[in-house]
Amino acid sequence: MNIGKLKLKNNLFLAPMAAVTNAPYRVMCKKYGAGLVYSPLLDEDGVIKAFDMFNDFTPDERPVGGQLVGRDPKKMAEAAEIIEKHVDLIDINFGCPDKDVLGKKAGAYHIKHPEKIHSIVSSVKDAVNIPVTAKIRIGWNNQSLNHIKTSMIIEDAGANAIAVHGRTKEQLYSGKANWTAIKQVKENVDIPVIGNGDVNSPEKAKEMLEFSDAVMIGRAAMGNPWIFGQSNDFLKTGKYKAVSPKEKIEGFFELIELYRLYKEDFKFPELRTHALWFTKGIKDSRELRRKMLTMQQEKELLKMLSKFLLTV
Ligand SMILES: Cc1cc2nc3c(=O)[nH]c(=O)nc-3n(C[C@H](O)[C@H](O)[C@H](O)COP(=O)(O)O)c2cc1C
């Protein structure tokens, strides 16, 4: 599929996730079949003041979307220019429900107060030569759904695609994602629509692709980069291979290698969280995972996982 002039090898995308989708994990998801990966949200002021401090983009993950969050059209454009050479598209976050982000009148704040959406999208679009997309929630709460209006504003401002998380701000991550609302956006705009919310299997990815142009997978990709390859296989052949416990643990070891390559200064708790995701659902891993929770050292974790690997 194409987003603007950007050609993508498939329409299965890794969602932006703060504290999850760092460079090592983005590279891994790309290797295992994601057509596009996203950075977590990057704050307009942070990018302008100190992008070099936290820039972890690497050519090995491309194509990658850099996601910006903010409230000021001028600053958003400036931040977009700063990250432009590292990324293949700029995504604008109009959905983050985090208190600090809302406090800065950014993220999902714009869903309640849509006055600036048009000027933010159009100034970012004017500032860069790469495609610009936006990611929205479907409203502030169920009584104020405004996904169709918001999407039309975003399209009119020149965006090349729109990602729709089928939940309201008040829902946060609870309840079921409203796929009907995503369908309604698709019926009302001509730009590609990227559906998002509750895709946790290749079957669900296929179902969502019946009414959207691409699928963005978030939580189900944590500790599970294979979901992209499995979904690609399922779409092409109607079948896919399950991932064995051995492959999962070896996958985690592969991620550690990627951390060494792309994020040398990582802190152990971050790795431990990934280990918990990668081992989720493995038979007889309960004790192992319980021990992991209090573990403080990488050496200890690796030793325990290597031992466990011999038993699976
Ligand atoms: C830990 C976590 C961090 C997230 N961070 C971001 C973010 O930085 N930017 C963003 O647009 N959405 C963020 N999201 C929302 C996801 O991109 C996605 O919209 C949401 O999880 C729904 O998709 P899912 O049902 O596939 O998980 C985050 C979600 C989680 C669970």
Image: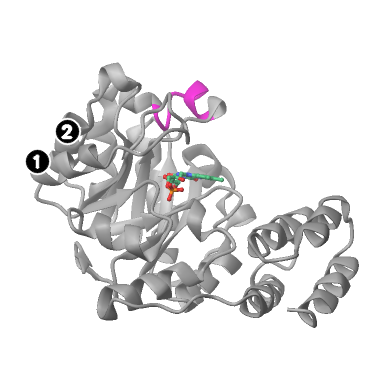
Q: Residue 56 falls in which quadrant of the image?
A: bottom right
Whether 169 is drawn above or below 217: the answer is: above
The kind of residue tagged 2 is: Ile
Which mark is on residue 148? Answer: 2
Query: Mark 2 to mark 1: distance in Å?
Result: 7 Å
Crowding at dot 2, Cα within 10 Å, few <14 / some 14-19 / many 20+, comes out as many
Question: In the figure, is residue 184 to the left or right of 195?
Answer: left
Q: Quadrant of the N terminus?
A: bottom left
- Is residue 131 visible to us here? no
Q: Pointers 2 and 1 in contact (CB under 8 A)?
A: yes
Question: In the figure, is residue 212 to the left or right of 258?
Answer: left
Q: Residue 54: x percent and y percent?
A: 61, 54
Please tell me whether mark 2 sits on a helix, a strand or a loop. Answer: helix
- Is residue 49 visible to us here? yes
**Does the Cβ of the disc 2 residue fall within 8 Å of ligand 1?**
no
Residue under the image location 69 percent in, 74 percent down? 249
Magenta stretch: residue 4 in it?
A: no
Q: Depth check: give the residue in front, 2 or 139.
A: 139
- In magenta, the rendered stretch is 101-108
Q: Main secondary structure of the magenta part?
A: loop
Q: Quadrant of the C terminus?
A: bottom right
Q: Residue 222: x percent and y percent?
A: 56, 58
Whether 289 is drawn above or below 43: the answer is: below
Q: Which residue is mark 1?
A: 188
Q: Depth check: give the residue in front, 56 or 300.
A: 300
Q: Depth check: give the residue in front, 138 or 27.
A: 138
- Mark toward the start of the polypeptide (2 vs 1): 2
Q: Residue 40: x percent and y percent?
A: 50, 50
Q: Residue 157 falls in which quadrant of the image?
A: top left
Q: Depth check: give the residue in front, 65 or 43.
A: 65
